[in-house]
Amino acid sequence: MDDPRKGRENQKHRTRQALIDAAIPIAQSGRPLVITEVAAAALVSTATAYRYFPNPQSLWVEVGPRALQVPRVDELTDLASDDPFERLTYAIEKISRFQFDDEPLWRAVLHATLERWLMQVNVPEEQRAPVRGETRAKVTRWSLEPLKERLPAALLERLTHALMLVYGLEAMIVTRDACGLDREEATAVMKWAAHALVRSALAEAEAALAESK
């Protein structure tokens, strides 16, 4: 005899998946996720949709990884080179390529992360849920691994943070909207800025070493 509880669980799974499937093309078009619109596209009542996803942010948690074909960190750090400039070039080119390929969706991701931050503005900082992942930080640290013996730890950490400003999602928005560049020009500027920061850090370390002698 069939267990009715299993049938209900299967139905819940199908309903949840229908909502996610309906949300993906909306997200890929660059439009914000609105629960009522997603519910209509999934042929689900609005009340039911809200039981599964009480707000757009909760839906984004499920939709984002499915809609975005984001490479894993190990796919962004698989270059066989010990040259930090080559590593940075490799990582920036790969990240820029997949972000520009899905630019509307990435802009929607930025919108969702800003909304998530605003929802927590009155929450103590130590209790806030993270609004961004760690991919860029991990890729940047991998790129700079060859410089660990050449740069003081504090300078290496500052360089890591500075590099995270010049590529990735926010850099894509600035180069496209504020600078008016096409994707190739934007990527070239990101690489130039990254290399310039590394050269500056190396020069600073060399100058400090010379002064200490």
Image (tube, helix red, strand yellow):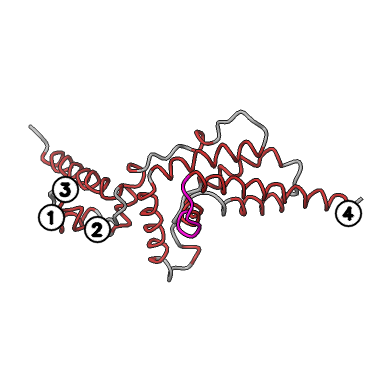
What distance separates the C-alpha of mark 3 from that of mark 1? 9 Å
Residue 153 placed where, x, y %?
72, 49
Q: Residue at x 50, y 38 (%)?
A: 94
- Name the residue tied to disc 1: 45
**Camera-side residue: 109 or 4?**
109
Check contact, mark 3 vs mark 2: CB within 8 A. no
Q: Which mark is residue 211?
A: 4
Q: Residue at x 88, y 54 (%)?
A: 211
Q: Which mark is residue 34?
A: 2
Where disc 4 sits, the SS reads helix
What distance separates the C-alpha of mark 4 from that of mark 3? 67 Å
Q: Amino acid at mark 2?
A: Val
Q: Amino acid at mark 4?
A: Glu
- Name the residue tied to disc 3: 42
Residue 142 placed where, x, y %?
61, 40
Placement of the N terminus among the 4 image quadrants: top left
Q: Mark 2 or mark 4: which comes first in sequence? A: 2
* Residue extending farthest bottom: 122
